[in-house]
Amino acid sequence: MRITAVGAGNERLLADVIGLGDRNRKTLGFLPHAAFRQAAQAGTLLAAVEGCQLAGYALYGLPGERVRLTHLCVDDDYRGRGVNAKLVDAISERHADRLGIMLKCRKNYGLEKMWTRLGFQMRTEVAGRSREREPLVVWWRSHDHPDLFTEIESSALVTAAMDCNIFADLHSALPRNGAQETQALVAPWLVDLLKLVVLPQLVTEIHNGSDAAERKAQMHALAGYQHPGLELVDEGRIRRNLMRQPGRSWASSCPGPPTTMRTLPTSSRPTPPACNCW
């Protein structure tokens, strides 16, 4: 499978992309055909192609220093084969100079696991434009560039990740027992000693809250904290290092076989011959 830019002059491939988008309009929403053609002219329309078949496409824009993902669509016959990951990785590779990729997705679609698997983190929640005003979740995939939090190195002596109770004590609009004690964590004299950060687990718990007003308020408060990325743990390397320590036996406590940390990036895989269908 290869990822290719859909040129404005490639009418057959462009028509197939537009057709796939139209067939999935119920979840993607309406997008004029002219918008597809404009993206093709701008070089911001990518297609995943296997042989002579269109497997999926990604349509995006480049506002400011970010990438804004508008459509990520995979044909039914190719779902479950990592096509969406190949398309998102291709966008990141082509625009690694941008701060990251941003998108908005309806909360009731239940796609949290998919976006998380693709390297995105929930950042906040906004009201949608539909008649029902269904909430939209804002997702962000960082390209690991310095931002407002990292341009100046923190002088804090301790970095602590907040759990949902601590975060609610600090930002809930509802009265909570013990919240006054938790407020001590943000006392002025602690600013240079303690840095509070947010991990993906906390964002997920807030996102799953049942009170819409409280959920929205806490999602907005997340923007004021650093969201450090988490890397997968190489269990095999850790186990080997432990077993090398003299005078210790780890045979009975070692975990099972190591899990694979990452798949090869798209650029490392052999590319099939170009197809002459389009």
Image (cartoon, rainbow, N blue to C red):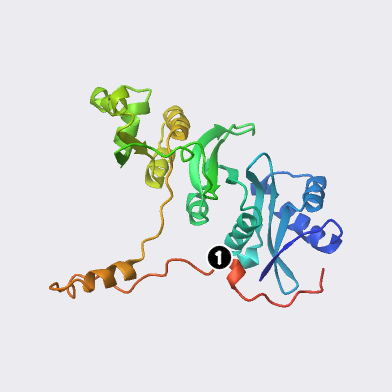
Q: Can you identify the residue that label 1 sits on?
A: 80
The residue lying toward the viewer, choosing from 255 and 177, is: 255
| Residue 184 figure quarter | top left
Residue 137 x, y percent position in the rendering: 53, 40
Name the residue nearer the viewer: 104 or 160.
Answer: 160
Residue 44 visible, this orientation = yes
| Amino acid found under the numbered disc labelled 1 | Gly
Please tell me whether residue 176 is drawn above or below residue 276 in the rendered image.
above
Q: Residue at x 64, y 32 (%)?
A: 129
Q: Is residue 44 left or right of residue 160?
A: right
| Screen quadrant of the C terminus | bottom right
* Residue 109 makes an appearance in the image: no
Residue drawn at x 73%, y 70% is 53
- Residue 124 position, x and y percent, is 50, 36
> Where on the picture, by quarter, is residue 94?
bottom right
In the displayed structure, 99 sits above or below 181; it is below
Which residue does the image show at 61% across and 53% down from the upper left?
96
Q: Give the residue drawn at x 12%, y 73%.
A: 247
245 in relation to 7, above or below: below
